[in-house]
Amino acid sequence: MRFPLTSLLPPSRRGTVALCAFAMASLLLPAPASIAQPVRDNPSAASLPSLGDGQGMSIAAERRLGDRIARDIYRDPDYLDDPVIGDYLQALWQPLLGAARDRGDVAPELAERMAWELMISRDKRVNAFALPGGYMGVNLGLLAMTDRPEELASVMAHELSHVSQRHIARMMTREDRMAPWMMGAMILGALAAGANSQVAGAAIAGSSAVAAQSQLNFSRDMEREADRVGFGVLTGAGFDGQGFVSMFDKLQQASRYDDGSFPYLRSHPLTGERIADMRARLPQGPATAPGSSAGPLNPAPVAIGSSIMGAAGLRLDLPSGGTRGTLGPTAGGSLPMPARTVHALLSARARVLAENSPDRQRAWLANGQAAGASPGDRYAAALSALRLGQRDLALDLAQRLRTAVSAEARPTVDALLLELLLAPTAAAASLPAPQSTLLAELRDQALGGTSRANALLGAQAALATGQPQRAVSRLQAWVALQPRDALAWQTLSRAYAVQGQSLRAIRAEAEARAAHLDFAGAADRFKVAQALPAAQRSADAMELAIVDSRRREVEALLRESVREESDR
């Protein structure tokens, strides 16, 4: 991602951006590989070494810092809100959160006050990152390079453990002279510097190398703790612990020829000690063959886009029991998990969405049409054909794939078909009869589903087929449960505009901006709504009252944000 670093800094301190990025880049240098004997300790949380309690930074302060960073990420061109991939990551994330809660890694206060929100970057480099306040990021490149659900889940469990163990707060405690604004700038600087490995290489030559090395050593301790806690979370959620080891093996192989495509290796130094420790935690007996496991130990698969998914959207809430979560059983219960066939399709999707090269897309298109092509290759071919402007070919490939995949993967292909039928080059009124029939079928199926992808794609299909009220009804129900879903609010705004409900359309625009923490933009849109002609305002008195109340709330948040900026 490319971040505007100066947005975090007070005017008097913006000249130190280079120093902040310089210091954080030093943290990203690879650690020398050192082999240590594996320790067969109990992987439970009680046996882990304590790195400190993070009391130097309150949960509220960490959340505020995370919100400031998240606000910049939302504005970044590489930020991606893809409902299909989001639902898939959710299916991995929810069991992990449930296991972390059941193990006591996520205390009730932490569960309530952290954001627990996922952010996706279209970056094709292999990386994931934990941010202050419970925000977590996943690059498309990471999903694209994994072969099994448990491999991706192992990285997410590791990053979750960075959050649950409050490693950012611990760093602030150790570096007590570092102001929160500087830490935020360093984090954004580190993510931005990932695009240029030379930044990290040059940083070590500076005069602050000794201090940076001290922080790096502390980071290694955090990595070991996140490994151990993460392994317990992964297996406690029902995933095969082999996923941790196989992911480490992939990263170790990549480290031998890393050309900058694996920034995860720089921010998470991979040592022989860490690899040996994860191997030692696997149960004794024959090792699981890389291709023999169906993924998570829980055999019930989840189909992305089907009604089996929860309705939590991008808001990554703790399953069951909590004040926010709406999903049912915890990791120890019967919460279904993704099947490997579904993972292959989503990995292919990530690969195509992260790539802008027409040559690569043409290669995937040819590969997916070859005899014996895998379902993942055929999915990549259909999506590549769409991006190359060959919509009819894309539809043909997707329909053939639909008849070939297993039942658990069918909803994922149905979501792709809806995406193809709704492509901007197509007008529903001009579609051939078979395609119009298929669009209506998939629209009704999606509107009856409970996943985020279902809600959003179904609403878009309803708009495309001249049924805006169905879109409004579905999205009103959705945002009532997920008020921070910006894309849902944007789609609802379109639906209201088609119906001629200007007040509601503008209010939905404001809510979308507020969901991305753009309080100034949200307040402006609420004011525009209130300034509509009297006839439009008086026609919907209840909505006008809501607009007035929400404007006051957002303006209060804006004042608080401005006050925090001035205090830095």
Image: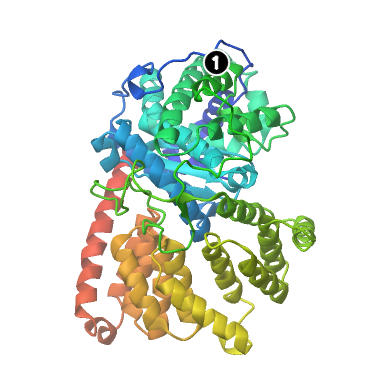
Q: Percent position (x, y) of residue 121?
A: 55, 49
Q: Is residue 513 above or below residue 195?
A: below
Quadrant that contains the C terminus: top left
Q: What scheme was used to colour the molecule? A: rainbow
User: Is the residue marked by circle 1 packed among few (<14), some (14-19), or many (20+) residues within 10 Å?
Assistant: some
Query: 527 left or right of 243?
Result: left
Q: Percent position (x, y) of residue 558?
A: 30, 52
Q: What is the quadrant of residue 190 in the picture?
A: top right
Residue beneath the point at 40% across and 57% down: 313
The residue beneath circle 1 is 213
Q: Of the residues shown, which amino acid type is indicated by label 1?
A: Gln
Q: Percent position (x, y) of residue 495?
A: 41, 78
Query: 328 left or right of 7?
Result: left
The foreground one among 407 and 244 is 407
The foreground one among 147 and 494 is 147
Q: Is residue 414 visible?
A: yes
Q: What is the quadrant of residue 104 in the picture?
A: top left
Q: In this view, does 348 lie above or below 203?
A: below
Q: Is residue 496 visible?
A: no
Query: 506 left or right of 4?
Result: left
Query: 248 left or right of 372?
Result: left
Q: Helix or strand or loop: what does disc 1 sit on?
A: helix
Q: Is residue 23 above or below residue 413?
A: above
The foreground one among 30 and 165 is 165
Quadrant that contains the N terminus: top right
Residue beneath the point at 57% across and 89% down: 429
Residue beneath the point at 45% across and 24% down: 228
The foreground one among 45 and 65 is 45
Residue beneath the point at 40% across and 40% down: 96
Q: Percent position (x, y) of residue 183?
A: 44, 30
